[in-house]
Image: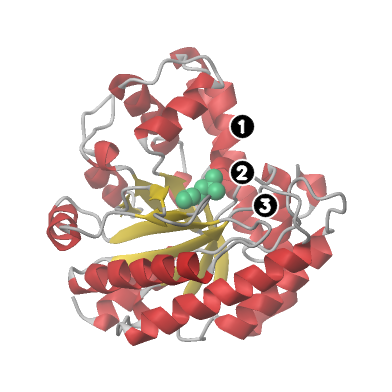
């Protein structure tokens, strides 16, 4: 696929007013989410849950693409038995796929992780393309701690992200590059800022070294937040200001879009932060700033669903509300009174 075509897909993913639904929870993560609502996680219950989300009326007004887990790529809608990639494509929603094999202990570096899944990745990507996927996701995990992250952790993870991204482009998929700094811990927002800056610089250095075409990718970063256990929690204005500053320092304007992860923020915070950043950047922003949220789009819907078919429309309304408010936030038109 040409760079022009990859760029077209990337721009469509981050089009103003739209964002990406991250519904790519692995089976163990899905079990954790389902445990919280006392629902057994089976292939059928996961299929039903994803069906509830994807068949939400008018989802395509606010959702440009959906990140699927490999299992979901092979599942189908409940009523009409249409494969999820075909169903999403029929709505003009782009199907994507999580392709990493998770974050595993980094040898000789206590408490740090490296994301695995590069072996045989090219062949898998070719298969995913045939099944209808047009973009992919790879998440690297970086923790902040006493002397963390180590330079080793940053180096191996950013190297892996770039290898994945190059392979995606070679196989016609737009890579979502996700270097996630985890916000658990008592670190300050300044700590988050410094680590995010370091990691994003390293990420773009690796991407350029490995000939990744920036016009044909999406960055999925964390926002710069106070650690969740930090005594002093930054305001919405501070978070937006510091996140925009770090992005301006590190992300070339050739990148078409930035789609944030929510990372455990409350639904309202994730929307308010995105909104404020879009207000700060305004019309002349070098990139479109949008959402690629998992929990911050799904949490109220998951709770309302509770595993029961009777609750499907209430759950869909809850999902639709978060999608609509985040859509407004991509234009800086959200206000907390709309909650
Ligand atoms: P959260 O928005 O729940 O952090 O999930 C986004 C995601 O895709 C993590 O990889």
The answer to whether the residues at label 2 and label 1 have Cβ atoms under 8 Å apart is yes
Q: Of the numbered discs in the image, which one, if any, rests on residue 317?
A: none
Quadrant of residue 106 in the image?
bottom left
User: For this view, does 163 lie left or right of residue 177?
Assistant: left
Q: Earlier in the sequence, mark 2 or mark 1?
A: 1
Give the vertical position of 42 relative to 302 (above or below): above
Identify the disc placed on residue 322.
2
- Residue 250 vertical position relative to residue 170 in the rendered view, above or below: below
Which callout, 3 or 2, points to the residue nearer the camera? 3
Nearer the viewer's eye, disc 2 or disc 1? Answer: 1
Quadrant where the N terminus sits is: bottom left
Q: Does dot 1 land on a helix, a strand or a loop?
A: helix
Q: Is residue 34 left or right of residue 123?
A: right
Q: Which residue is mark 3?
A: 270
Q: CA distance from mark 2 to mark 1?
A: 8 Å
Mark 3: is the Cβ under 8 angstroms from ligand 1?
A: yes
Which residue is drawn at the image coordinates 53% and 18% (left, top)?
A: 306
214 versus 220 height, above or below: below
Please give the residue where the numbered disc 1 appears in the rendered image.
Answer: 300
The residue shown at (39%, 43%) is 24
SS of the residue under disc 2: helix
Mark 3 crowdedness (10 Å alpha carbons): few <14, some 14-19, many ≥20: many
Q: Position of residue 290 (x, y in %)?
A: 56, 63
Label 3 or label 2, whichever comes before in sequence order: 3
Residue visible at 46% across and 75% down in the picture: 203
- Residue drawn at x 49%, y 78% is 202
Residue 259: x %, y % from top left? 52, 63
Q: Is residue 5 visible?
A: yes
Q: Front-most of 299 and 162?
A: 162
Helix, strand or loop at label 3? It is: helix
Q: Farthest residue in the right direction?
A: 232
């Amino acid at each position: 696929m040409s760079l022009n075509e990859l760029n077209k897909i990337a721009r469509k993913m981050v089009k103003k007013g739209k964002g990406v639904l991250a519904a790519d929870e692995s089976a163990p993560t899905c079990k954790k989410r389902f445990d919280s609502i006392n629902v057994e996680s089976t292939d059928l219950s996961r299929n039903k849950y994803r069906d509830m989300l994807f068949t939400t009326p008018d989802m395509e007004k606010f959702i440009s693409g959906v990140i699927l887990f490999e299992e979901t790529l092979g599942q189908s809608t409940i009523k009409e038995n249409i494969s999820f990639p075909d169903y999403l494509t029929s709505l003009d929603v782009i199907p994507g796929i999580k392709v990493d094999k998770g974050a595993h202990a980094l040898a000789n570096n206590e408490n740090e992780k490296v994301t695995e899944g590069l072996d045989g990745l090219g062949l898998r990507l070719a298969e995913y393309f045939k099944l209808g996927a047009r973009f992919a996701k790879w998440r690297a995990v970086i923790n902040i701690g006493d002397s963390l992250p180590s330079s080793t952790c940053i180096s191996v993870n950013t190297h892996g992200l770039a290898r994945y991204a190059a392979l995606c482009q070679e196989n016609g998929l737009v890579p979502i590059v996700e270097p996630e700094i985890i916000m658990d811990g008592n670190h300050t927002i300044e700590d988050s800022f410094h680590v995010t800056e370091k990691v994003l610089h390293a990420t773009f250095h690796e991407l350029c070294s490995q000939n990744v075409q920036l016009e044909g990718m999406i960055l999925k970063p964390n926002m710069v937040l106070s650690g969740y256990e930090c005594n002093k929690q930054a305001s919405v204005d501070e978070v937006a200001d510091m996140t925009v500053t770090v992005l301006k320092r590190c992300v070339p304007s050739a990148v078409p879009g930035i789609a944030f992860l929510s990372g455990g923020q409350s639904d309202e915070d994730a929307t308010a932060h995105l909104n404020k950043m879009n207000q700060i950047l305004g019309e002349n922003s070098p990139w479109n700033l949008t959402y690629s949220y998992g929990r911050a789009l799904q949490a109220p819907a998951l709770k309302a669903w509770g595993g029961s078919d009777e609750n499907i429309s209430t759950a869909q309304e809850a999902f639709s509300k978060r999608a609509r408010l985040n859509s407004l936030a991509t234009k800086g038109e959200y206000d907390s009174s709309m909650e």
